[in-house]
Image (tube, helix red, strand yellow):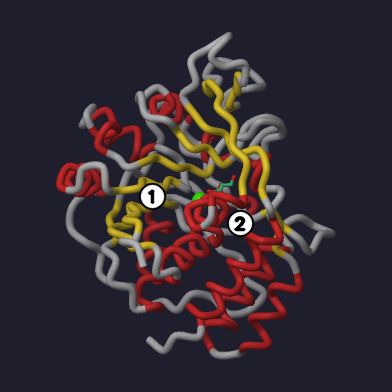
Amino acid sequence: MNEPLHVWLDADPGFDDYMAWALLEADPRFVVDGVGVVAGNAPLERTLSNALRIKALHGLATPVYAGCDRPLAQAQVTAQDVLGENAMKSVGRTLPAAQAALSPGHAVDALIAHVRAHPQQVVLLAIGPLTNVATAFMRAPELPGLLKCLVLMGGSTDRGNATAVAEFNIAADPEAAQCVFDAGIEVLMFGLNACRQVEVGPEHVALLRHDGGEQALLFADLLQAYTELIPGRQRMAVFDPTPVAWLANPAWFGLEPARVDVELAGRLTRGMTVCEFRVPRRAQANALVAMQADGDAVMDWAMRTLRGFLARRV
Ligand code: RIB
Ligand code: CA
């Protein structure tokens, strides 16, 4: 087997962040070198508590660091109106209260030190607001050039979810997102348009309930609540795990080069990712934007991988 892919995860747990992290830990092709936690789905205190509970529950060795607790230049917005107080709704079981130890130091400093120590070897996967990532790039301008690649769940080439046109991770810190798209590194962008081609539903919940075991049943309760987030529906797009699936098998996706900028001034459009695909004729590309996803292949892999992870005895 080839050398595993080293991944630094920047996240705002959130259930789909949990699912993405679990997939990275479960698949032997990945090594998670660190998790930087950022405010997003909920204030940092809560996203950090969720991360340390996940770490404790699964007995993970991965260090977890506290990151930025507010956006660069706007008031904090969260997704608690949709996801609930703890940013992780459940139809029953919830994450046990036990928390693992937090690693010392700020997530931004830990990210900078780690990438400097392992040049061209680390994939930075950002699945929350980009405040930590932008702060790291501002503090260490050489950092983008030292990364193996930068992959993010965020933005959209069409409809938004935080607003009519803005996706939550970008809308939660638009200035940070623009800083990242301007950092001189090609951004691999998995937006809502691609993630909405990957759906989770009752059939996936049933698989976990059939497996049984405390961890699978807990995950099933969280997953079922996630599938029911939109009133009247029992299916939901899979956001944060989608770029993880691309790392596992890029052949499941179609990506196109584009110049991506973030609207910062629009009264109705602030936080929108404006994607110019007429590159290089009309603009210099700064991103590869996911446009197609094989949702069935992604979910087959995701459920196979998750079921193995949740069956592990800690
Ligand atoms: O828009 C989806 C994104 O917002 C996901 O990362 C989800 O966890 C929330 O952070
Ligand atoms: Ca997230």
Q: Going by the picture, which residue comes out furthest to the right?
A: 232
Question: Hey, which quadrant is residue 69 in on the image?
Answer: top left
Up-down relation of residue 238 to residue 23 (above or below): above
Q: Secondary structure at mark 1?
A: strand
Q: Quadrant of the C terminus?
A: bottom left
Q: Residue at x 49, y 63 (%)?
A: 18
* CA separation in Å, label 1 and label 2: 19 Å
Pointer 2: what residue? Answer: 83
Residue 131, given in percent of the width and then of the height, sits at: 38, 37
Label 1 C-beta lies within 8 Å of the nearest ligand 2 atom = no
Q: Residue at x 40, y 78 (%)?
A: 57
Q: Residue at x 28, y 72 (%)?
A: 61
Amino acid tagged 2: Leu
Amino acid tagged 1: Asp
Up-down relation of residue 140 to residue 121 (above or below): above
The 10 Å Cα crowd at callout 1, few under 14, some 14 to 19, many 20 or more, is many
Residue 139, given in percent of the width and then of the height, sits at: 22, 31
The answer to whether 31 appears left or right of 187 in the picture is left
Q: Earlier in the sequence, mark 1 or mark 2?
A: 1
Up-down relation of residue 92 to residue 108 (above or below): below
Residue 60, given in percent of the width and then of the height, sits at: 33, 73
The 10 Å Cα crowd at callout 2, few under 14, some 14 to 19, many 20 or more, is some
Q: Quadrant of the N terminus?
A: bottom left
Pointer 1: what residue? Answer: 10
Q: Residue at x 69, y 56 (%)?
A: 295
Up-down relation of residue 310 to residue 185 (above or below): below
Q: Going by the picture, which residue comes out furthest to the top?
A: 282
Q: Name the foreground residue: 208 vs 116.
A: 116
